[in-house]
Image (cartoon, rainbow, N blue to C red):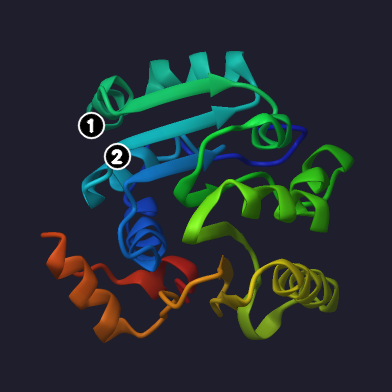
């Protein structure tokens, strides 16, 4: 937990794989990936399966990372030791603002935007900074965030609507999934797709099995 909000569960029981196999195929060629939080959630090992050259991860809290590392499953621990991986302890917004590199895929898995600290990663200004360090056609992934499906609290619906409109103000193309939780996608390219058949084909091209993507975001 961070600031009273859940970051991830240890050990990963398979919830992350479907999310990663929905997020990563949005980029046609994710060679350089930036993870903003979520490095210990199980996402790292999944991202590495997509033929990436380098994954950089940013975690705010050094000590929560130390605690998480001690409790990781063996496969997640090996992912941290992969030579393609480099982790930083830094504030995600500060890292993005000062970054001189460009990425094919940036995935933000910050806590829900319910505190001043977390909200800084959900603003128009931050999304503009993210856009600057994406390669042309690169993809920004945000979430998962609470959506609650057909029984969503009106406040949740308004919040998610504001997030989508804010992304649309920065990126030519933005989409959001439906379900109990949701993922947001934004890009200046043409690669975004939520069709099962197309995503399954993209995974097949990368030698990965089909994943039931939408059961991860709508388990009901």
Mark 2, other Cα within 10 Å: few <14 / some 14–19 / many ≥20: many
Which x, y percent locates residue 90?
Answer: 65, 22
Residue 141 placement, left or right of 206: right
Residue drawn at (71%, 55%), measured in percent from left and top?
127
Residue 36 sits above or below residue 196 on the image: above
Query: Of the residues under marks 2 and 1, which one precedes in the sequence?
Result: 2
Crowdedness of circle 1 by 10 Å Cα count: few (<14), some, many (20+)? few
Q: Secondary structure at mark 2?
A: helix
Nearer the observer, 139 or 164: 139
Q: How far across and down, in percent of the image, does residue 115 sit?
A: 85, 44
Splitting the image into 4 quarters, where does residue 174 fall?
Answer: bottom right
Q: Which mark is residue 59?
A: none
**Residue shown at 25% from the left, 22% from the top:** 83
Q: Label 1, on which residue?
A: 75
Residue pointed to by mark 2: 45
- Outermost residue on the left side: it is 207
* Viewer-nearest of discs 2 and 1: 2
Given residues 126 and 142, the one toward you in this image is 126
Residue 60 spot, x, y in % from top left: 65, 26
- Picture quadrant of residue 33: top left
Marks 2/1 in contact by CB < 8 Å: the verdict is yes
Task: Establish if 85 lies above or below 131.
Answer: above
């Amino acid at each position: 937990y961070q600031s009273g909000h859940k970051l991830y569960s240890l050990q990963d029981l398979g919830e992350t794989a479907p999310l990663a196999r929905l997020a990563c195929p949005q980029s046609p060629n994710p060679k350089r990936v930036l993870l903003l939080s979520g490095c210990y959630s199980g996402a790292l090992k999944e991202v590495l399966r997509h033929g990436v050259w380098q994954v950089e991860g940013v975690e705010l809290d050094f000590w929560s990372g130390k605690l998480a590392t001690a409790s990781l499953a063996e496969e997640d621990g090996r992912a941290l030791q992969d030579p393609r991986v480099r982790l930083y302890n830094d504030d995600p917004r500060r890292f993005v603002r000062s970054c001189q590199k460009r990425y094919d895929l940036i995935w933000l898995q910050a806590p829900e935007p319910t505190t001043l600290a977390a909200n800084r990663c959900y603003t128009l200004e931050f999304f503009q900074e993210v856009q600057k360090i994406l390669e042309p056609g690169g993809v920004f992934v945000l979430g998962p965030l609470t959506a609650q499906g057909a029984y969503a609290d009106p406040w949740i619906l308004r919040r998610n609507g504001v997030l989508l409109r804010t992304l649309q103000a920065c990126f030519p193309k933005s989409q959001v999934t439906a379900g109990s939780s949701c993922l947001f996608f934004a890009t200046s390219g043409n690669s975004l797709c939520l069709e099962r058949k197309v995503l399954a084909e993209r995974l097949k091209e990368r030698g990965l099995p089909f994943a039931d993507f939408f059961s991860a975001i709508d388990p009901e």
